Image (cartoon, rainbow, N blue to C red):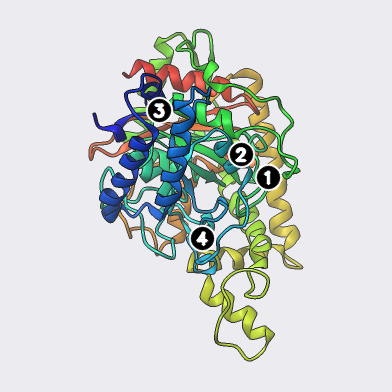
Amino acid sequence: MDICRLTAHEIREKYHQKELTVVDVTKAYIEKIKQEDEKIHAIITVCEEEALKQAHEVQALFDQGEKLGRMAGIPIVIKDNICTKGIKTTCASKMLENFVSPYDATVIEKIKKEHAIIIAKANMDEFAMGGSTENSAFFKTKNPVNLSKVPGGSSGGSAAAVSSSMAPVALGSDTGGSIRQPASFCGIVGMKPTYGLVSRYGLVAFASSLDQIGPMTKDVEDNAMLLTYIAGHDEHDTTSSKKENVDYTKALTADVKGLKIGVPKEFMGEGVNSEVKESVLKAIDVLKAKGAVVEECSLPTAEYALPAYYIIACAEASSNLGRFDGIRYGYRTKNFENVHDIFANSRTEGFGPEVKRRILLGTYVLSSGYYDAYYKKAQKVRTVIKQEFDKAFQKYDVLITPTAPTTAFDIGSKINNPLEMYLSDLLTVSINIAGVPAISIPCGEDSEGLPIGMQVIGKHFDEETIYRVAYTYEQSEK
């Protein structure tokens, strides 16, 4: 039996049948990381000693007949911008290279309470800024499907870890597509929940009004299971919803009869690769054959989402990253004569080029004389985009689009062309701007054998319907 090929729910079943122990599974995944990560570079920190200690403790609870949750004994990889007590949280940046968090993020507290086993922290674009995981200060992550391709970003390490079976599940964060786009590129399932459904406490902030933690998994059932445990109100996060907790696995029925699906024509137009478009349309036909009602619709303001997103996101990044000055937080330069030198040199040496680019852009759009022309206008566009989604959801249960306009691109092909790189977020950013949930699920491959992702978008706090659609499609393809 190849333990690392199993899904989380299959591992759980093996525990119940006493075919596997938690220690066996944990050792298998740690060994897999040691073997595979030399070529993929998905992992920044391996938590071997602590993971094995936890594994023995959880197995003892199983042996004692304790009734444990569905995540008990499941190995998990955590994106390295989510705080983990006693473990480095670097954000893949020289600025936080040696930072060991003194506390756990709320999502980490929740999965620890369910006795999941944290086995590693995953590589990412520095401070979650990028779409290829080439902006890490430490190393570039490769796509396990094709090592010459990027895994997507910024949660590329988490996606690559799941895709290469170095972990059955992982946590990522999504600001403008950073869970969904790498999920699409690596051929896995990635969910960006409704803004406020999952606590952001302990997530190192990039753009606070857009960031959201979410699950990255091999299949839809694991995804629904992990979201069930990380969702919920948190008094530490003032943007956290007070919505009652939901068991999302109960939504996994392969039935979409009568469900109304809208296909926004703006998301199928210019810039979308023909093979990607064809695969998504075929997947929609599968749902149609299962009884769903499919119609073309329009979101005319969608073309303005990308510029609005980069103005808002960079403005918030400029503010959030102001704390990393070499005095209060982060790396401190050794080359200084006064306080000004400490500020300037620490930030110059500590931040990478993409982070600096976004800080500069964000500071510019917030500056006197430009605030009204850029930032205020972008916020107005944000309101219109949200209203358009609200209007569409008065008629449709879900919207379906491609996740990314292309499949995974070559490593190095876009790193020196920021505008071209930003266009890879074309189909995902409007979802963060509107605050609605969306999932990416695999729906085929292109002529090179690279995965293609389909994006299912839902109403605020209606993750159940999204999972229902995703599960129906997934089951029909088995």
> Quick one: label 3 or label 2, which is nearer the N terminus?
3
Q: Looking at numbered disc 2 in the image, what kind of residue is underneath it?
A: Thr
> Quick one: label 1 or label 4, which is nearer the N terminus?
4
Residue highlighted by disc 4: 90
Q: Are marks 2 and 4 in contact (CB under 8 Å)?
A: no
> Quick one: label 2 or label 4, which is nearer the N terminus?
4
Foreground disc of the pair 2, 4: 4
Residue highlighted by disc 2: 301
Disc 2 is placed on an element classified as helix
Position in image of residue 89 (x %, y %): 53, 57
Distance from the alpha carbon under mark 2 to that under mark 4: 37 Å
Q: Residues within 10 Å of mark 2 (few under 14, many from 20)?
A: some
Distance from the alpha carbon under mark 1 to that under mark 4: 34 Å
**Quadrant where the C terminus is found in the figure:** top left
Residue highlighted by disc 1: 381
> Quick one: label 4 or label 3, which is nearer the N terminus?
4
